[in-house]
Image (cartoon, grey):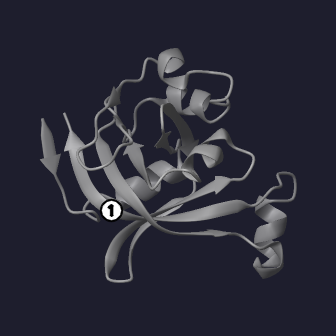
Amino acid sequence: MITPVKFDEYAPQVIQQLQGDGAFLTVKSGDKLNTMTIGWGTIGYIWRLPVFTVLVRHNRYTYELIEKADNFTVSVPLGNLKSQLAFCGSKSGRDTDKFSACNLTPQPAQMTATPVIAECALHYECSIIYSQSMEQAALHPAVLNSCYQQQPPLHTIYYGKILACYLNG
């Protein structure tokens, strides 16, 4: 059963989940589908719109897909699926069907071509309204040193207008 919720109703739980084990960012482009674990993102209100902001590194398979897509979903497990999150954060979708490997079920979304992950409790369906590649020169040195010292390249930031937010189950 799907229960619509306000986009910010579970914001504290989402932020806590992102800081802990992460959430699933899923993207579909054509017949290609991939999910990855994200630990950086935020929910907010920008340009008079509810927005979920996600960051994707340029060397990720998800980056190839999201650059061709106009939407994405974020599925938040709210405390479970720890091993699946670890797997999806350490393996590439170029080489592995993460859905099969982790027994995750792509569930058709309500408003986007990209599905959500059925085993998760909370879902955000988003339409990309803006993206921007980060510039190293514009990044504060403390953030650069603590977050990118060992792991270039930088991210592209995607701003997704939240089209739907709901609980599943």
SS at mark 1? strand
Residue shown at the point (36%, 24%) measured from the top left? 105
> Considering only vertical position in the picture, is 6 above or below 115?
below
In this image, 92 relative to 162: left or right? Answer: right
The image quadrant that residue 9 belongs to is: bottom left
The amino acid type found where label 1 is placed reads: Ile
Residue shown at the point (27%, 63%) measured from the top left? 7
List the residue tagged with mark 1.
162
Q: 94 and 137: which one is in front?
A: 94
Residue 33: % across, % down = 50, 33
Count the numbered circles shown.
1
Residue 12: % across, % down = 37, 61
Q: 131 and 15: which one is in front?
A: 131
> Considering only vertical position in the picture, is 58 above or below 7?
above
In this image, 52 relative to 7: left or right? Answer: right
Residue 66: % across, % down = 55, 50
Q: How crowded is mark 1: few (under 14 residues within 10 Å), some or many (20 or more)?
A: many
Residue 4: % across, % down = 15, 52
The quadrant of the rendering that contains the C terminus is: top left
Residue shown at the point (81%, 59%) measured from the top left? 148
